[in-house]
Image (spheres, rainbow, N blue to C red):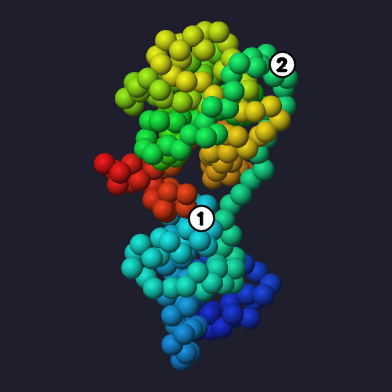
Amino acid sequence: MFGSKKEIFEYINTQRDHYPLNLLCRLYEVSRFGYYAWKARGQSARTQRDVEITEAIERIFSDVNGIYGSPKIHQVLKQEGMSVGKNRVARLMQENGLKARCARIYRNNTSQDRFYASIRNEIRKVDATGPNQVWVGDVTYLKVNKKWRYLAVILDKYSRRVVGWSLSKRRNVELSLTTFKRAAKKRLIQAGLYFHSDRGIEYVAYKYQNWLKKNGVIQSMNRKGVMNDNAEMESFFHQFKAERLHRNEYQTEKELRAVIIEYMGFYNQKRIHSSINYMTPNEYEVSLA
């Protein structure tokens, strides 16, 4: 059908409005970069520069499994030494169909009647100035082969670092307490550490409250009817589900656990956050040392 790559590229160029470029390149066994290079020949310096930037954008986008939008892609490009404007990155991503992955979150709506009014939101007026001053935690639902599993996670609010997590078949005080004890083994906790959570029954169990008090931890909880009191945890679970669970199905707990382990390492060591100057949690903590 075609006698040369040039003819292939010319044909692909006529079909771009009808079919995804990825599909066309795979079908005709040519690379996207080759197509861009062909298209840039004889064109303006600005167009050729767009091709170079697009190649860099696609590389970064692929490296993070499509989870970064244009602001974070722009930051990574700057960190790599590439001079490019935010609007140009956004335009090129839009033109090439590079849109960050996102997912809706399944939320638990079960009754939370056992709430002790004595546990207030203690962190509203606390400004953390370093790690290990305020921790936040929550539990979310995950599905494995049509069965629920429960993931408890604790973050350091200041650095956004995951300091502990645990997966269980049951959502109970043992799950939450195990998570906190694991975090305490990894981090140096001192009397006066705040721990904030939602109003789940596992967090108001006497066993949990007593363990925190024994170790000098000040317990804090969401105000009734105020969901964004624990915004950092809401954000973390949203990101995790969008970046690893959306459109993926896991048949065994072993598969799910492997994904969680991989993501926790990725989140702490590689995922940049706008709230901490576009650093990873690990980098941010090191910068404070």
- Visible residue check, residue 77: yes
Q: How many marks?
A: 2
Disc 2 crowd rating (10 Å Cα; few below 14, some 14-19, many 20+) is: few
Answer above or below: position of 287 versus 229: below
Residue sitting at x 58%, y 11%: 205
Secondary structure beneath dot 1 equals: loop
Residue 104: x percent and y percent? 67, 43
Report which residue position mark 1 lands on: 68
Q: Quadrant of residue 21?
A: bottom right
**Which amino acid, by three-letter code, is at mark 2?**
Asp
Report which residue position mark 2 lands on: 113
Residue 15: x percent and y percent? 64, 76
Residue 146: x percent and y percent? 66, 27
Answer above or below: position of 48 versus 134: below
Residue sitting at x 46%, y 64%: 74
**Which amino acid, by three-letter code, is at mark 1?**
Tyr
Secondary structure beneath dot 2 equals: loop
Residue sitting at x 63%, y 75%: 16
Gap between marks 1 and 2 measured at Cα: 39 Å
